[in-house]
Image (tube, coloured by chain):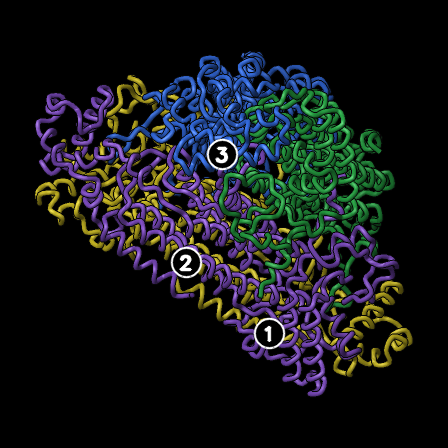
Chain colours: A green, B purple, C blue, D yellow
Amino acid sequence: MTGHDSAGHDAPGAASPAGAAGGRAPHQLWGGRFALGLEEAADRLNRSLAVDHRLWPQDVRAARAWVLALGRAGVLAPDEEVTLVGGLERVGERLADGAAAGAPDEDVHTLVERLLYEEVGELAGKLNTGRSRNDQVATDLRLWTLEAIAEIDREVAALGEALVGQARKGLDLLLPGYTHGQRAQPVRWAYVLVAHAWPLTRDRERLADAAGRTAELPLGLGAVAGSGMPVDRTVLQKLLGFDRLSPNALDATGDRDFVAETLFALALLATHCSRLAGELQAYASSEYGFVRLADGYSTGSSLLPQKRNPDVLELARGKAARLLGDLSAMVGLLKGLPAGYSKDLQEDKAILFDAVDTVLLTLPALRGAIETLEPVAGCMERALDQSLLATDLADKLVGAGVPFREAHTLVGRLVRAAEAAGVGIRDVGTDVAQGIHPKLPGFIATLGSWDDSVERRATAGGSARAAVQAQIEELATAFQVVL
Amino acid sequence: MTGHDSAGHDAPGAASPAGAAGGRAPHQLWGGRFALGLEEAADRLNRSLAVDHRLWPQDVRAARAWVLALGRAGVLAPDEEVTLVGGLERVGERLADGAAAGAPDEDVHTLVERLLYEEVGELAGKLNTGRSRNDQVATDLRLWTLEAIAEIDREVAALGEALVGQARKGLDLLLPGYTHGQRAQPVRWAYVLVAHAWPLTRDRERLADAAGRTAELPLGLGAVAGSGMPVDRTVLQKLLGFDRLSPNALDATGDRDFVAETLFALALLATHCSRLAGELQAYASSEYGFVRLADGYSTGSSLLPQKRNPDVLELARGKAARLLGDLSAMVGLLKGLPAGYSKDLQEDKAILFDAVDTVLLTLPALRGAIETLEPVAGCMERALDQSLLATDLADKLVGAGVPFREAHTLVGRLVRAAEAAGVGIRDVGTDVAQGIHPKLPGFIATLGSWDDSVERRATAGGSARAAVQAQIEELATAFQVVL
Amino acid sequence: MTGHDSAGHDAPGAASPAGAAGGRAPHQLWGGRFALGLEEAADRLNRSLAVDHRLWPQDVRAARAWVLALGRAGVLAPDEEVTLVGGLERVGERLADGAAAGAPDEDVHTLVERLLYEEVGELAGKLNTGRSRNDQVATDLRLWTLEAIAEIDREVAALGEALVGQARKGLDLLLPGYTHGQRAQPVRWAYVLVAHAWPLTRDRERLADAAGRTAELPLGLGAVAGSGMPVDRTVLQKLLGFDRLSPNALDATGDRDFVAETLFALALLATHCSRLAGELQAYASSEYGFVRLADGYSTGSSLLPQKRNPDVLELARGKAARLLGDLSAMVGLLKGLPAGYSKDLQEDKAILFDAVDTVLLTLPALRGAIETLEPVAGCMERALDQSLLATDLADKLVGAGVPFREAHTLVGRLVRAAEAAGVGIRDVGTDVAQGIHPKLPGFIATLGSWDDSVERRATAGGSARAAVQAQIEELATAFQVVL
Amino acid sequence: MTGHDSAGHDAPGAASPAGAAGGRAPHQLWGGRFALGLEEAADRLNRSLAVDHRLWPQDVRAARAWVLALGRAGVLAPDEEVTLVGGLERVGERLADGAAAGAPDEDVHTLVERLLYEEVGELAGKLNTGRSRNDQVATDLRLWTLEAIAEIDREVAALGEALVGQARKGLDLLLPGYTHGQRAQPVRWAYVLVAHAWPLTRDRERLADAAGRTAELPLGLGAVAGSGMPVDRTVLQKLLGFDRLSPNALDATGDRDFVAETLFALALLATHCSRLAGELQAYASSEYGFVRLADGYSTGSSLLPQKRNPDVLELARGKAARLLGDLSAMVGLLKGLPAGYSKDLQEDKAILFDAVDTVLLTLPALRGAIETLEPVAGCMERALDQSLLATDLADKLVGAGVPFREAHTLVGRLVRAAEAAGVGIRDVGTDVAQGIHPKLPGFIATLGSWDDSVERRATAGGSARAAVQAQIEELATAFQVVL
């Protein structure tokens, strides 16, 4: 017993059989031309309420706007308009109270129309005059996506703030900067943290760009060729808060670029989280020991009593793969489809909802882990070994007129000599150093402190104090704006 | 309001807050070494019961086997063993009655242990002696996967039977065979149907191969290094019906190859369904008109009263993209992880369950659509135009000693002449044909019927009657075996 | 013999063994600290010249800017600066003459430095003072990407123009608009064409957004922590034409967001091409017959003399999958990497180059196919069957006060009656129609021409003449701008 | 200048324009029915020689078999057969000498036929009697794939042997086993190495399964419906070494399951390499220091003289993403295609070749890195901290009758007390330990050596000496077989 039949769906309708007589739900938006209803297997595959019920607030909102537009166009009489608007309000209340749970309907649009019938009777049959589920669902999903992007953007900014907060406290902590997983040069802990904050600013730009292209209204375009009713679409646009009108019905009803683009922005955001989380997961190991996760963000083992596991970080890393899957699914879905609506597109919602849910589950946990992280200065310091000064030495040779490539080779030899002698490069015998280059011993003597070394890289964007402080301030402003 | 917070989860535990005091659930498999409990955001990300509750039958089954093995090893006294087995039986009954719904536990393993405490008291604390969630979940998921594969295999065979059933009825129906979406040569309708049945036989082989590699028992391997209890793992293997033992604990606890391989087999199966569905979707259009879907597998439009939409076929096509996404997610998840258990692996279940659910939703609907499909002989016949005989003519020229490449060119010219004259190639003027090659008019005269043409391709695997009949019989046997 | 060893690489260096002594190439940017050179298998995996040689123009350009900046910072003497700039000019000339072919170097940076040694001697060793391959390759690749985007953008605009050009000629051609692959309502051929042009305007926006985020200069950031030389990065920025500076060295050297974002924009563009191509491929079939591909964009069969295959369209469709693969590879590559440079990132170029090459191969061919496409009016007209007027009838009933949902059901019944009688809905017996609704016969009588029907959907974005003409003008302006 | 136009192709034909008159190459397998040749943009997209030239050995081999089969069927006269076989032999020699370089042909099939014309004149026109490029390319690619799998399998076995070789030497080295990146329990170094060898045995099984399904002969099935010539396909099967015949022409010409399955096997293999490489990359860091890469498998930095980078390991990790991309591309390519040949399938080769090349570049480098790896015993030992004995203590409490769950909690408390006191768990004050459980001090005293701890996990598959030795022997046999 695999259990998939009983738990594959997350919501209303999943458990409800399609209805006694041939599988048709009682209320339906179509069917006049058919002698018989849907078979159960077809109905189970076709039915989308278990997924799309989440669109009900958007569906009701768009329905209300549509009624107003039909009224303005004279398609509905004033009293009809009033009755329908009132009915929709009550439908919204019932849905907010959970009316979607266990509903027998094919999809959210059918559900809303059925409830409206219950509220206002036959007049409900006028709601969808000149409107198709094709322009309807595209409108609902765009509204939903805009809200999801706004919510995610707030969480991304909050994560950025957490990084900036830790960076402020970590300006004086020095540790190795790594490339290839190997110690490279000393840097500030704050500098590492802001390195992970900058990608979030790009994520927010991408989310904003995606939102900009999502804010295009399909409503009023009908099924494929425009609406047969003389509705003024700019009225709808203003009522629903879109930036502009979709320019072509055939394009707009089959276009899911906005979903794909949002998924890409989320996949890259999740990838950034995975990079941050992966790096912290290493730093939280006994071997690095650079950070200690708070108890509230650590988990234990069912078998090993001593374990202190960074599950939050590992999950944040793993989720990037799930988002990659969602993105692949959506791009793959669109491949080769003609313009206009194809039922394949129904998959868009399950994919998008999964991605948004996943990101909204991950960001707050990751933020909390960072806010409560404790850097361990002693471990950081112990990791600063003398070889990290090799470039400083080469730069000093450059100052003495040695071409850099040659200086690089000379210091390379010094490193080899130090390794052979089992000492740090500062502690190589003077004669040996002098044998490599006469000025080396003198330069070694003037290497100074770790802080001196860090401050030598003072170009904009480097790890020197002023450069990092400037970054912190710029990021603090960037992340604060939205809150 | 995007609604994702309230509906992102599909099952027990989703709605239950993590508990008053710091977010820890009341019963927990770990925690002694921590001063404080999990924060809520961490708990929400970490908690997996909403997904893994589906593993309860496997978890109870494996727990029972573990108790028996502990008993045999002398780790449990006989009466303890009896009590625990009895307790687990009652736990299973409670879970079958829905005890997982609303449960506050971190995961299915915690849930089962907690319920066992409720049944047998402190003795429950002995259940997981020498056992870790790492070997436990790997065992549960392998058991689940084996059952899922078996169920899917039955559905694939049933789909194959449906194709064979239609093929038996379609042996005499002729239509164009297509390449590049263009008419190529006349073939039998039965031949087209079996062409889509053969891939299913390969799918079943791949599923069987995946099952073979899944049937390897991890239980008794502990968290990372083997169990500290002297349990005989071959006892467990027999009790749980596995083929052999996983050979290495570090490998077995971090290995999800069996999930990836199952997902690949399902993705390719879904791709085959998409190819079949895509082809039928075209044939169900007014332009081809080769098949008519039954009412029970057709849907309507909310705006266009005349529409008769092949939603089932389009959904079957689209689902292939979702499976591709699941596969990508899983392979991406594993990239770069060290051996042994990492929490990233927790994602495996959501991905696998989604894939299995999707396939089990799709196959029966597609099968029903095929079982009830009506071929439309008239449309098929009308699509057989004379150009489909071009290769026959070239072959006749070959028989007269003309090298094939030249014959191909000559008939190409005939085709061009026919197009220019606006006639079929049989109706090109004799003088024109003769001007191309003196024997052409004679060969044109002996082209015979469409059936003659089909029978000319009598190699094994071709579209001639005997070849197709042989395929039907072979496939019928292949698909029958399991039922 | 699989042949992969001899043909796996596309360019210089592929065939050249790594060098006699232990596999090290003669010139190398590192090595002082090693006793022994790279083994051959390691060298083959590590060597990237066969791929990255394409970056030589960017590498030389960035090297020149770096020399000027070092000069301004006083790190190079004026005569050194002049000599190096002159040397780089000659290096560029030699590379333009093919000097990369057969070069033994590890990568393009080594190649350029070696050639510079050949031109100016030991002074060449000063070129990379304070510079790392980490900031270098990020700069080169950003420059390359900006040029690639510009080139692709021009091709996208040209494809858009081709669609607009055909649309101008197709304003009066009517054909069915399709949803679910089924005839839905009559539309203009021009309308279908512009429906495929609009996505291209979004693609260009996305490409521009990607370019905007690519135009950020990493140069001067060193390997991980900033440069040790007091170089003014804004000088570099202006010399190389970037919009702004990368703000953090650790981020900038490990950031490949710009590659991923470009790949996404290209994957979605390729998906749009696949949708256009897929739809045209169907229309080019004998069954639809709506369009005829020019000879110059059709191919034949090696066996079937009559075939006229739309290979260009099928390839354009298939390429979308390849782009999806490139996108997946890049997002998957980044997952879990720490900030800063990891060698994994070397894969970025092979992936990006493949995607750009593929798109630049596809767009011109698709454009040509569209420019030379001939619409077939007769076939389009024949496909307009009476059922396409069903919504018009329902709308007329709405005008008479029948709620739309009821009107939909009534017309559905009419469709069923027509099918049963084997006639079109205009030709159903008056009594039958009247039995369904008393006003139906009258409405049927006033349905008018196909053109009348199309003009009834006159909302902005619909298929009515004025709406389509407005779209054509808007698109013409949009695509013209760049040319 | 992006440079993609000049370097996008890897081989013959890339540079050669399609020919003066309208873009047709001089020799062509089709064209009689066309008035005009291919336009250049179409030709560039359509031409596949730059990729498929690698199939020439397979194409010549299959051509030879086809000639023999045509002879046996009486379609060719004995002397024709002899002449053609001789001609093909010379064609093969010319191709081995590089005749494909710069060839103007559309694809490898055209190339071979053209060269045959050069060798034997007009008789060459009989070569492809009753044969289509559709069955031809499917045959060639299956032959190529079988050879590629065999070659890869040898490399996988060699990598496995390298791991086993190191494992033999590492039986006495102890280090922490990790879960979640955290130290868990002591294990043997040999045990870690074999944990990465076991997945390779599964990879080889999957490769063998893929090969088994690839060994199915399409030749003799024509373009879509079977061959018009009475060729005995079993003769072909034996000549070409296939296991059995493809059962259906429509299926076989459009089936690329074998490519997808091979790509999946390679993607999972690459994922295993990425896991091994990723783990070793961490162990090669200064923080772990468990292994030292040989100079021949280490690389340096262009800026930082001291760096010793594990590029080989990082590249092996990154390549897994590229393989994921190839797999996604192939599965995405197949989605929704009808049965039979569609030109989209031409993409299969570029994808498969890229994957095979990538794997064959990676495996030898990774193997070399492992063969020459030096374990660093001191670092491993230093990483064994007392907390790794926590489970041993819990197990001892279990032995004294404490239920495991309670024992786990008690030891967790001991760990917390040790941390608070800043000591290891063996060094917690006796009174403190006694306060947690009276028997704890005694059990702490009997914990013994690290080796004692490892030997306590003696279940099959655990890390105890005998269990690891058994694994080594089993694996040695498994990997030896093929060599």
Q: Marks 3 and 1, Cα distance to the nearest angstrom?
A: 82 Å
| Residue C429 in view in this figure | yes
- Position of B187 relative to B28 (above/below): above
**Residue matched to label 1:** D465
The percent coordinates of residue D247 (x first, y second) are 30, 52
Q: Quadrant of the C terminus of chain D?
A: bottom left
Q: Which of A275 and D32 is in front in this view?
A: D32
Left or right relative to C246: residue B360 = left
How many other residues sit within 10 Å of disc 1, few (<14), some (14-19) or many (≥20)?
many
Mark on residue C414?
3
The percent coordinates of residue D403 (x first, y second) are 77, 78
How many other residues sit within 10 Å of disc 3, few (<14), some (14-19) or many (≥20)?
many
The percent coordinates of residue D90 (x first, y second) are 19, 39
How many other residues sit within 10 Å of disc 2, few (<14), some (14-19) or many (≥20)?
some
Residue type marked 3:
Leu
**Residue matched to label 2:** D209
Residue A65, located in which quarter of the rendered image? top right
Q: Which residue appears farthest toward the bottom when viewing the image? A: B78
Disc 1, SS = helix
Give a yes or no on whether discs 2 and 3 share a subunit. Answer: no
Q: Which of B109 and D8 is in front in this view?
A: B109
Q: Which residue is drawn at 52% across and 25% down?
A: C115
Q: Which of D107 and B110 is in front in this view?
A: B110
